[in-house]
Image (spheres, helix red, strand yellow):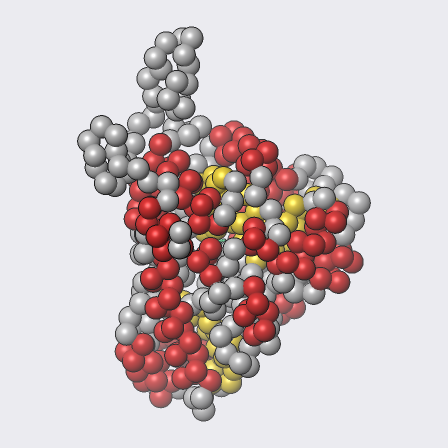
Amino acid sequence: MGFTTKQVHAGVEPDPITGAILTPIYQSTTFVQNSVDEYLAKGYSYSRTANPTVRVLEKKLAILEGGADCTCYATGMAAIQAVLQACLSAGDHAIVSDVAYGGTYRLCTKIFRRFGVEFTFADTSNPDAVRAALRDNTKLVLTETPANPTLKLTDIAAISEITRERGIVHAVDNTFLTPYFQRPLELGANISIHSTTKYFDGHNATVGGAVIVDDKALDEKIRFVQNATGVIMSPWVAWLTLQGTKTLSIRLERQAANAQAIAEFLESHPKVAQVRYPGLESFPQHELAKRQASGFGAMLWFEVKGGVAAGKKLMDSVRLCTLAENLGSVETLITHPVTMTHADVEEAERKRVGIIDGLVRLSVGLEDPEDLIDDLRQALDKI
Ligand SMILES: Cc1ncc(COP(=O)(O)O)c(C=O)c1O
């Protein structure tokens, strides 16, 4: 069965009582038990532990990623937190991609370090750097590819080979490409993490997260954390995300085509100093992008000549592109990571991983590409 058929149908059955084609929103705290002896007869007891609407989304996402099972969360950060909690204890060490999303860096350095977990932020695009960072107490390698916002890639298969040799877990934040374009578990990783806030929702309507794993025992460990910490997804968010997921591949195809057209336009513009999009021949890891993913996604960044002042002027001059934090939605969003999404990452760390001051991030949406290009052209004319 093809991906698009699965994204529509997988995990979803018509409601057995009414025949409703959409999974109902089971907005119920608790579930009545048949008898004391038959506790949990229908599989549900209390909505922090499991909820039928959320469970349908979890099953669908597990199938789309080709995993053993999935757990869903209140946000993408809650999903990452659950993975760290399930895999790490005080005294353990984790290697994290040095270009990971700023919120991931903050979670590791400001929260988990307080509980005695050690981190090395390594250049995971270089397998030798990962090997060099391994310690006897390393339990987890967490990569993000493409990374937010640099779009630096990590070779998932190469890193998985290292982690498998050592019997440790490799978790990949797959938010930017989704299983439509990239399936980390098929490349050897153990865990694929998502902020469902982005492409699965796709409509700027919710915040949510998901963790898909390759193994039932690992899922049990993570599900224990999900229940124990209570960082669950609500049934209403799961329902909205279920509807968004049904059009994921269609949106991504169009958004990626738009991104390619915009990247090519920007690359040829005299006021643009540099453009990064994995689909451009000039992208430093273009060959890896082609090898490990079936599409290049819809995120790009560029730097305008004239530094931060020119970048700010551009962002204030766009009319159709919307100045807002978030990505993956049908609306094209423009962001300045240094002052917005990555403001919590120290300046020296930002510079080291390549988040330059003038970097403008574009999350390309579903609008007509000519309109987006016209908008960027008129904004570039003003600087
Ligand atoms: C790659 C990546 N992972 C995780 C997150 C966190 O997701 P959320 O905002 O849903 O907590 C984000 C948010 O931008 C992200 O870009």
Q: Quadrant of residue 38?
A: top left
What residue appears at the point 28 percent right and 78 percent down from the top-left corner?
A: 371
On the image, which quarter does residue 215 sit in? top right
- 143 and 217: which one is in front? 217
Q: Residue 285, how many percent across, how many down?
A: 59, 73
x%, y% of residue 125?
Answer: 65, 65
* Residue occupying the point 65% across, 45% down: 169
Q: Is residue 203 left or right of residue 124?
A: left
Residue 121, above or below 363: above
In the displayed structure, 80 sits above or below 203; it is: above
Nearest to the observer: residue 83 or residue 53: 53
Q: Is residue 336 visible?
A: no
- Residue at the (52%, 64%) spot, across then down: 293
Q: Is residue 68 left or right of residue 242?
A: right
> Percent from the top left, x then y, of residue 51?
37, 31
Q: Nearer the viewer, residue 288 or 72?
A: 288
User: What is the total number of numbered labels drawn onto the structure image?
Assistant: 0
Task: Please say whether residue 62 is visible from this viewpoint.
Answer: yes
Residue 273, how many percent across, how many down?
51, 85
Given the current orientation, which residue lies at the most extreme bottom position? 270
**In what quadrant of the picture does the C terminus appear?**
bottom left
Q: Residue furthest front?
A: 1
Residue in the picture at 57% in, 43% down: 214
